[in-house]
């Protein structure tokens, strides 16, 4: 059965103290409010990885993620952080292919395929992001555009490896804009992606793949989004920086 996951992407926010406070609040609320069956993943900037890990401790259901990893195994790549290093610090998830990395750091489908392989080789779960621009949505080619991103970066994987990947559909026009895709638009794309996965890997693997929605999700719209049969959680940006909002999104299931 596929997992319900709500991942918080802090992006390039939070000083040390702010990150400590946010993490402690989230971990305490998760425990005190007896949240079950929804995995909360915290994806802070790299320097927070170790201290956040310590605060999470052994709380079941709260996991540590990162926002990126290198496509290389190890070596002279100044400024890069490998999947191997992240795994050794207790990281379990890694966001790959976020539209901000595709746009500002020119990450393409081929590079992302390598990053996904590195993550899997070291036991990290990739949260693979895909999504279309407003231009593509307006042209009506969004479905084929997003399917192509999966084909190019993920469909070289063996069925065993693919079954470890989490997908996050994030329409670019909805990220940080306050303009959420409607729950029906999200459902339509998630169902299309699941059919696409089924055509390649079979119905069973497709049914077990968690597909998250991202883009201006908040406590006010999460319930409707999560009520859709193919929406298995969220990748949350802005609202993950406020503990109450993040927890309320998790509790929207
Ligand atoms: O990774 C998260 C997404 O980019 C969504 O960000 P947002 O919730 O601030 O729109």
Image (cartoon, rainbow, N blue to C red):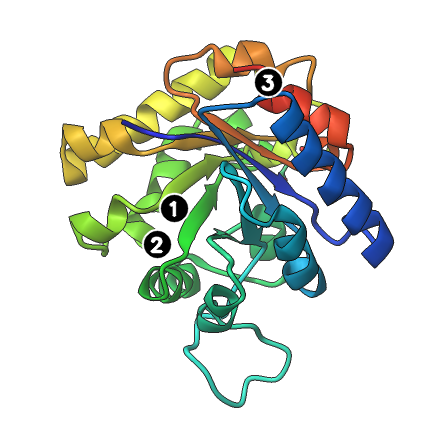
Q: Would residue 49 be found to the left or right of residue 165 on screen?
A: right
**Residue highlighted by disc 2:** 153
Tag 1 and tag 2, C-beta contact below 8 Å: yes
How many discs mark residues in the rendered view? 3
Q: Residue 36 carries which label?
A: none
- Residue at the outermost left position: 202
- Dividing the picture into quarters, in which one does residue 187 lie? top left
Q: Tell me which residue sits at (60%, 17%) in the image.
A: 222
Disc 2 Cβ-to-ligand 1 distance below 8 Å: no
Q: How far apart are marks 1 and 2 (CA)?
A: 6 Å
Q: Which of marks 3 and 1 is nearer the N terminus?
A: 1
Judge by depth and name the residue closer to the eye, 198 or 36. 36
Q: Tell me which residue sits at (55%, 9%) in the image.
A: 224
Q: Tell me which residue sits at (64%, 20%) in the image.
A: 33
Judge by depth and name the residue closer to the eye, 252 or 149. 252
Q: Which of marks 2 and 3 is nearer the N terminus?
A: 2
> Is any atom of residue 31 visible in this view?
yes
**142, above or below 54, in the image:** above
Q: Residue 149 carries which label?
A: 1
**Residue highlighted by disc 3:** 251
Secondary structure beneath label 3: loop
Callout 1: few (<14), some (14-19), or many (20+) C-alpha neighbours within 10 Å? Answer: many
Tag 2 and tag 3, C-beta contact below 8 Å: no
Dividing the image into four equal quarters, which quarter contains ligand 1? Answer: top right
Q: Tell me which residue sits at (56%, 55%) in the image.
A: 102
């Amino acid at each position: 059965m596929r997992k319900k996951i709500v991942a918080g992407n802090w992006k390039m926010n939070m000083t040390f103290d702010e990150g400590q406070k946010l993490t402690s609040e989230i971990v305490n609320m998760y425990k005190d409010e007896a949240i079950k069956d929804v995995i909360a993943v915290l994806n802070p900037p790299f320097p927070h990885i170790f201290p956040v890990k310590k605060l999470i401790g052994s709380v079941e259901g709260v996991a540590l993620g990162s926002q990126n990893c290198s496509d290389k195994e190890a070596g002279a790549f100044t400024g890069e952080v490998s999947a191997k290093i992240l795994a050794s610090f207790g990281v379990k998830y890694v966001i790959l292919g976020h539209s901000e990395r595709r746009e500002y750091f020119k990450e393409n489908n081929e590079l992302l395929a390598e990053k996904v392989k590195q993550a899997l080789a070291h036991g990290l779960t990739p949260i693979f992001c895909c999504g279309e621009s407003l231009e593509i949505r307006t042209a009506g080619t969004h479905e084929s555009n997003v399917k192509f991103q999966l084909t190019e970066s993920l469909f070289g994987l063996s069925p065993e490896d693919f079954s470890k990947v989490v997908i996050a559909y994030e329409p670019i026009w909805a990220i940080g804009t306050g303009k959420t895709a409607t729950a029906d638009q999200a459902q339509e794309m998630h169902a299309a992606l699941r059919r696409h996965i089924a055509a390649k890997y079979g119905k069973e693997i497709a049914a077990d793949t968690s597909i998250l929605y991202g883009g201006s999700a908040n406590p006010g719209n999460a319930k409707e989004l999560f009520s859709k049969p193919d929406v298995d959680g969220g990748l949350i940006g802005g609202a993950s920086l406020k503990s109450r909002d993040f927890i309320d999104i998790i509790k929207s299931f």
